Image: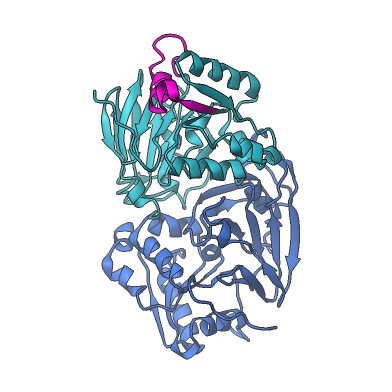
Chain colours: A blue, B cyan
Amino acid sequence: VTILAPQPGRGTLMPIGGAEDKRAARRILCRFVELSGGSTARLVVIPTASVRWTATGERYRKLFLALGAETVDCLSPTDRGAANAEANVALLDQATGVFITGGDQLRLLSHIGGTAVARALRARFAAGVHVAGTSAGASALSRYMIAFGRSGEVPSQRMVQLAPGLGLVENLIIDQHFRQRNRIGRLTTAVALCPGMMGIGLDEDTALIISPSGACEVVGSGSVTIVDGRNLEHTNVYDVKRPYPINISGISNQTLGHGERYELPLYEQAAGW
Amino acid sequence: VTILAPQPGRGTLMPIGGAEDKRAARRILCRFVELSGGSTARLVVIPTASVRWTATGERYRKLFLALGAETVDCLSPTDRGAANAEANVALLDQATGVFITGGDQLRLLSHIGGTAVARALRARFAAGVHVAGTSAGASALSRYMIAFGRSGEVPSQRMVQLAPGLGLVENLIIDQHFRQRNRIGRLTTAVALCPGMMGIGLDEDTALIISPSGACEVVGSGSVTIVDGRNLEHTNVYDVKRPYPINISGISNQTLGHGERYELPLYEQAAGW
């Protein structure tokens, strides 16, 4: 497998399905350090999604230093005032990579959505900084975010709640702990609510590495499920009462394992949904 | 009251709370025709939100012709294929104003979200075409749309479901039939899910005319309620289980009647949430 080379311009986006290996080969976390410059990587960890943000941030700080990163800072705005504070924004100035931890994606967005830190993160990503997010941090990367929902196979009304995410990518809906928590129903429902977009379901210990061109590579021990809604023909999501099943036609699903490639036509459509 | 002059660049946006007067003075509909050029107005009506789209479109066509518009066409994509068809897109080419009817906003977006018609509408609005929407058509104008929800005063978890809207404005959440259907709870919950954004609650027969500069004017027999979330301090929306009340602090509400003005700092923040 050829490793995708970083490209100038926008950064590489790396959603991870949660529970990535932190003790053995750690290939997902290694890959993120390597992508961000290896021994010259200057990383910022944002652990705000986690209730135990201090411990979570410290754990990743130690992990990334052990994997050879040059510096690792934690950016932990615990209220919206801190997320608008210049000192916190400045932490992003020198970063080559930003890592967003797990926890609760709506907790993260309630603290930093619409703040200077979120705007700076988008600006830095647009300028080439790589951004990874695991579990809640993965869901938070896109513009429309699965805030919460319930498990199950059958796409159904009110199965999923959407909210604004960080907006690093426009047309993806990202879900995580995918196979482990049986989330195909809620991801498909989300795609019905967002016709034309692509759903990305990440198993645990599995990442999708999305290069600036949209060329993707799967890394990890699980699979990535792609719910392709670009040619969605019809959905009755507007007609169904809670919590009954919805219809959706014209979507196609794929499942990709470690080393597999995929082309996401993402950024051309950026203003295009 | 000075009428806001149309400005070059982006069009004027005109969300209407539904049930606008169609028999007497018709001042909201008159205002839209006038804004779009009066006797030289070339209007396109999009009635797709309505189940009875043919009748709804025809009703507005007759109304706008009676109010002096030069031409009125109906653009009614009844499936996503039609919403990607060149002939339908071309209907927007010569329009000076577009009017989106009521019905069900998620029905509208399920048919045209992510299609060529939606992209053309955004492009035409950016080039100066004025866009009005009533009821469902008002909610559909913004990027994050209230898809559905329940009535009540108390902001509560799962009270509102968000989905992608047409994206003509970034940082507003628009609700309608506001006082008549007691929707302050769901609009406030939506602002909690979208911290930093502004909620706009439109009573029936009431419009907010939003000029390209963000200068606004209220027209109609009811009120416009503004739920200003720009300085939101804290919300526990991520912590509350269904369907319990949520906390939200730092928001401020205003209610404005006919002829009142307001400045929405909208477009400067366009890339900024």
Q: Is residue B30 magenta?
A: yes
The percent position of residue B6, horizontal first and vertical second, equals 34, 33
Q: Is residue B38 left or right of residue B148?
A: left
Q: Is residue B2 magenta?
A: no
The percent position of residue A91, horizontal first and vertical second, equals 34, 74
On the rendered image, what quadrant is the C terminus of chain B found in? Answer: bottom left
Residue under the image location 71 percent in, 69 percent down: A223
Q: Furthest-left residue in view?
A: B1
The percent position of residue B258, horizontal first and vertical second, equals 30, 22
Query: Is the residue B34 above or below the residue B142 in the image?
Result: above
* Image quadrant where residue B272 sits: bottom left
Residue under the image location 33 percent in, 50 percent down: B268
Q: Furthest-top residue in view?
A: B24
| Res. A179 in view | no
Query: Is the residue B201 above or below the residue A86 in the image?
Result: above
Numbered range of the magenta stretch? B20-44
The percent position of residue B253, horizontal first and vertical second, equals 30, 36
Out of B148 and A36, give the one closest to the viewer. A36
Q: Is residue B126 left or right of residue A237?
A: left
Query: Is the residue B105 above or below the residue A44 in the image?
Result: above
Out of A169 and B58, give the one closest to the viewer. B58
Residue under the image location 39 percent in, 61 percent down: A118
What number of labels is visible?
A: 0
On the rendered image, what quadrant is the N terminus of chain B found in? Answer: top left
| Res. B15 in view | yes
